[in-house]
Structures are given as structure tokens and as C-alpha cells.
Image (spheres, rainbow, N blue to C red):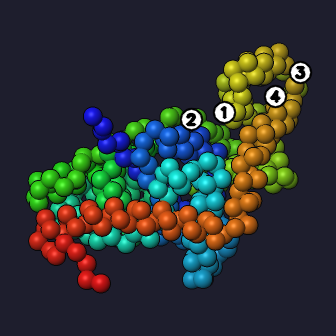
Amino acid sequence: MTTTPKRVLSGVQPSGKLHLGNYFGAIRQHIALQDEMQCFYFIADYHALTTLEEATRRRLDREKIKPADRAETLRENTRDVALDYLALGLDPNKAVFFRQSDVPEVTELAWIFSTVTNMGLLERAVSYKEKVEKGIDASVGLFFYPVLMAADILIYRSHLVPVGKDQVQHIEMTQDIAGKFNRTFGDIFPIPDFRLDKEAKVPGIDGQKMSKSYNNTIDIFAEGKPLQKTVMSIVTDSSPKEAPKDPDRCNVFALYSLFATEEEKAALATRYRAGGMYYSEAKQMLLEKINAYFGPFRERRKQLAANPDEVEAILQRGAQRARAEARQTMALVRQAVGMKAGYLV
């Protein structure tokens, strides 16, 4: 007896350069899952529209942003996410990889979900409140984000959604929306569960959590002098060379530990505690680790970047597979709510 493999769904917003926090916190696990389950991964360009102004300002560092700047930011960031995931090992023959906006049925499902979603549910969204507090415009789209996310997940009738802790509430809201729809119109959707991404403590160069919002990231595909400048700017204390140093309180050591073996970590920790070492030496060791780890991925990315038609073809094939699934779901949904199951051509 064969069983249908669990379907995994995850999306990544094209809101800027992907960094080490993204890689160790999520991307590495997403790529590993393609060998275990049926995976749908999408570039969330609809969602990115809610924070496009902020993303454009980070990209251009300008006071005045033109409409063309916003459009180019979304195109560039979407292209970068596609290149990054493919270069880092996502296999389009194993995982369905596509742009969110290439499956317009998801917006139709989001509207239908909005008719069974209570305002009180959305008003409790912590992520919305936090983004508004950071100065992001309190748009309807930002408020509606959890409903569109529910549609993203449920239109492919996904079973499992890998997320960080900050997204767990959105999965719980998706469960509520699916349950309300099923009770109202009949059992169409499985109730998805979340899988917490493996915790990876990735400090930014200032010691806070690595985040584009804090402008403290180390980009995955940075190299050469820009990468060296970033690594050498990691904040450390002012201990002199001869003083013993605490590896457990050092940002450089924490980042080095992401790449190093247990033996290498123990050896560096011993040097820290013994004194007689500048932090710049540890930073140089980290730089070498980053270059060694991501070097092969950089070459693959350059090959892909030189063949944009190949990348576009991969995304289109993924969209065709995703849209076929979405249309099957929408036929069931339309019939359940009393609409014509198919679409006029």
C-alpha cells in the first residue's frame, strides 16, 4: 500500500539580498526537505508589495523614490531570490519552484477566504502591529497578509509549512480560516501544521539578530572586498590582544561556529580563553570559512545569471505545475460555494 507524500509549502519574500540568517535559519532546511517530501516553494512577490517602499530605499539609499525604482526593485529582488535558491541547491526536478504572481488563482481564493474570516482574527496579528510600529504603512494589503498567506498554503492543499517562530501565529490563523471554510462549505482543505525551522543563532554584525531591517547582514553571495569589509566590521569588545576573551559572548565566534566542526570550534575557543589573539585574526578565519563554504555556490550562481532564459524557463515550468494544482483546488472551492467550477476561456 502506497501513501501520498506530505506536501510542504514555503515562500520567501523578495525584499532584499538573502543573508546568512536566511540561509542557516531556513534555506538550508528547505533544500534538504526536497529529498524527503513533495515541496512547493514560491517567491512571494505579491506579499513583497506591502513593504516595497522600504525594500527600494534599502536598495537605492535615496530620499525620493520614483515609481520606476519600485518596479525595478521588485524585478531585481525576485530575480536574485530565484538565482540564490537555484545556486544553493534547489532542484526544480524535485521541488516545484515558481513566482507567486504566476498563479493568480491564489488571489481569488484569498478573496473567498476573506468572506469567512473575522476581523478580530486579523486584528490580533502580532506581525502587522510590529511592522506598523517600525514605520511601514498600515495598508489594507499589510493587514490582509495572513489571508493571502492562508490562500498560498491551502490552494495547494499543503500539509506542512516550515516557519520560524515569528510566523507560527500566521499558520494558526490559516488553520482557523481552513476550519471555518470547511464548516461553512464542506471539507475541502486539510488543516496544515507548522514545522519550526531549526533554530540557528545568527547574529548580525552589530550583535542583534541578523535582519535586513537592522542593516546588519552578511549577504550569502557577497565576495571580495565588500565581503571582507563587512566581516571586518563585526562589532567586538575592546579587549587588548593579550587579554583572555569569552567565545560565548563574541559575535565573530558565533558566526564562525555556523561553519566550523566541533574540533575547530573547540580549538578557537581555547585560543580565545588563552589570550594573545586579536579579534581580527578570528575575523580572518571566519572570512576564510565563508569563502570556502559558499565558493562553489557563487560559481553556480554566476552561471545561472549568465543564462536568464534558463532561470525564467524553470520558473515558468514550476508555475505551470503549481497552477495545475491551484486550478483543481479552485474547481472544488467554486463548486462548494455555488459558482461555476471552471473558468471561461
Residue at x 49%, y 65% (from the top left corner)? 317
Select label 4 or label 2 by which is in front: 2
Residue labelled with disc 1: 258
**Gap in angstroms between the C-alphas marked 1 and 3:** 24 Å
**Gap in angstroms between the C-alphas marked 1 and 2:** 8 Å
Select label 1 or label 3 by which is in front: 1
Q: Amino acid at mark 4?
A: Ser
Residue 134 % position (x, y):
49, 58
Could you say which is closer to the camera, residue 316 or residue 58?
316
Verify CB contact (< 8 Å) between mark 4 and mark 2. Answer: no
Q: Quadrant of the C terminus?
A: bottom left
Residue 310: tell me if it is visible: yes
Residue 122 picture quarter: bottom left
Q: How many marks?
A: 4
Q: Amino acid at mark 3?
A: Gly
Could you say which is closer to the camera, residue 49 or residue 329?
329
**Gap in angstroms between the C-alphas marked 3 and 2:** 30 Å
Using residue 19 as the reference point, say whether residue 98 is left or right of it: left
Ranked by sequence position, the earlier of labels 3 and 2 is 2
Give the label on residue 105, or none: none
Instruction: Assign a secondary structure to mark 4.
Output: loop
Crowding around mark 4 (Cα neighbors within 10 Å: few <14, some 14 to 19, many 20+) is: few
Q: Amino acid at mark 1?
A: Leu
